[in-house]
Image (spheres, grey):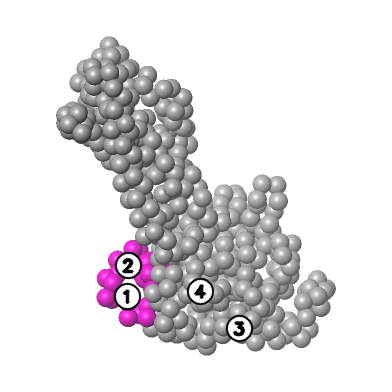
Amino acid sequence: MARPMIDARGVHKRFAAVEVLRGVSLAVDQGEVVAVIGPSGSGKSTFLRCLNHLETISRGSIDIEGETLVATTADGVCRYAPDADIRRICRRMGMVFQHFNLFPHLTVLQNVIEAPITVKGLRRDEIVPRAEELLRKVGLLDRQASHPSRLSGGQKQRVAIARALAMEPDIMLFDEPTSALDPELTGEVLRTIRELAEEHMTMLVVTHEMAFAREVASRVVFMDGGEILEARPARELFAAPEHPRTRAFLENML
Amino acid sequence: MDYLVRIIGPLLEGTGVTLQVFLISFVLSVPLGLALALVRVSRFAFASSLVNGYIWLMRGTPLMLQMLFIYFALPFVPLIGVRLPDFPAAIVAFVLNYAAYFAEIFRAGIQSIDRGQYEGARVLGLSYAQTMRRIILPQVFKRILPPLSNETITLVKDTSLIYVLAMNDLLRAARGIVQRDFTTMPFVVAAAFYLLMTLVLTLAFQYLERKHAVYDG
């Protein structure tokens, strides 16, 4: 068995007096698509943000592709890797946010090529063909000269996906990628994510789209109150949820 | 008309002094203000509070007092005592004072940028410096153009304060002629010159705002 792409063990996270993550453990294998579902405030977005160091954890450990991002010693000291290692490790993960976070002063194409040029030091002529290919893939090649403010929410999110892919990540993290979209625009974004799944991209998707979770995810994780209550293959979890809170949540959603 | 032609020479000379003080002060105080703002918003708490204190000092005392201090009192300050000629003394005072105001404008701009921009840049692997240079500051620049324009126009007019160092700027030149010839005409001409300078600046800032209007946000 190859080592998991993401290996989080006993992750605790505390905001002041509130413990938002209470010992979350999850391993994600190469090519797996894991959907994280659960009520608002269950800690699913926070958990995702801990994986790429947008939040720091207070206890537990996280390995990415076998490299230690953060570990906790036996006497409870939580220690992160040196800054340079953190940046290198986190660069293997692309992330897509609920609110896109596109750079408004740059065009669509500039958004996609910014990081490859600035971070990886690629030349413009090296990255532009690849960026155009990615934009074609998400169906926005004809909008490459537009600024994000001229795009619909669904188009913005597809640009955000292309932008993340331009850094050639091994893992993609999606933080409620369709929650800020009008219902009629979620389909185009979900379709793009589904295509990535078909290419066996390793993905962790926090979502409220149950139909999407059921069809695309290989595994579904149900979180509530800062804990993972259930993590099973999608079909099983939706067909016969084990935990009463999972059952109550799904009945509410469907 | 003949009279106008006669007074225009000295007034133009005064305008030259005004423009020199303005341009040099502007070119030096904007980058210094930006640097101060970056320290102010940085995670280095001690440096940040030092800048805060500096801004309090510079905004809390009259610019004229600062100019008089640098010219007359600085030579007697132990250790850093230097005697500056009038022109450099004026420039130092303007730069130190205006940098404080520009710093606050930059800080307001930097803090108005959504946290999501930092996170978006960070997950793409950009360092803090790269994020500032490539993502945050270009957006800040667009947002602060109106207050920057305000402060810049104020600087043009504040240059008239250098009369306290007996320098012959536009306003002092005009006043000299008024007192000599008992006519207010030089004031009218001086006002027209100030208006012309601020008009050029206004148009320049309007051009910059239009240029940056290609995107919203």
| SS type, badge 1 | helix
Earlier sequence position, callout 1 versus callout 4: 1
Distance, label 2 to label 1, CA atoms, is: 8 Å
Question: Which residue in the structure is indicated by mark 3?
Answer: A187
Earlier sequence position, callout 3 versus callout 1: 1
| Subunit ID for the residue under disc 4 | A
| Subunit ID for the residue under disc 3 | A
Residues A157 and A10: in front is A157
Question: Which residue in the structure is indicated by mark 2?
Answer: A117
Q: Where is residue B105 in the image (x, y as percent from the top left)?
A: 44, 42
Q: For the residues carrying marks 4 and 3, which lies nearer the camera in this image?
A: 4
| SS type, badge 2 | helix
Question: Which residue in the structure is indicated by mark 1?
Answer: A127
Distance, label 4 to label 3, CA atoms, is: 16 Å
Query: Residue sitting at 39 percent across and 74 percent down?
Result: A145
In the rendered image, residue A124 lying in the magenta stretch gets the answer yes
Judge whether residue A95 can be spotted in this image.
no
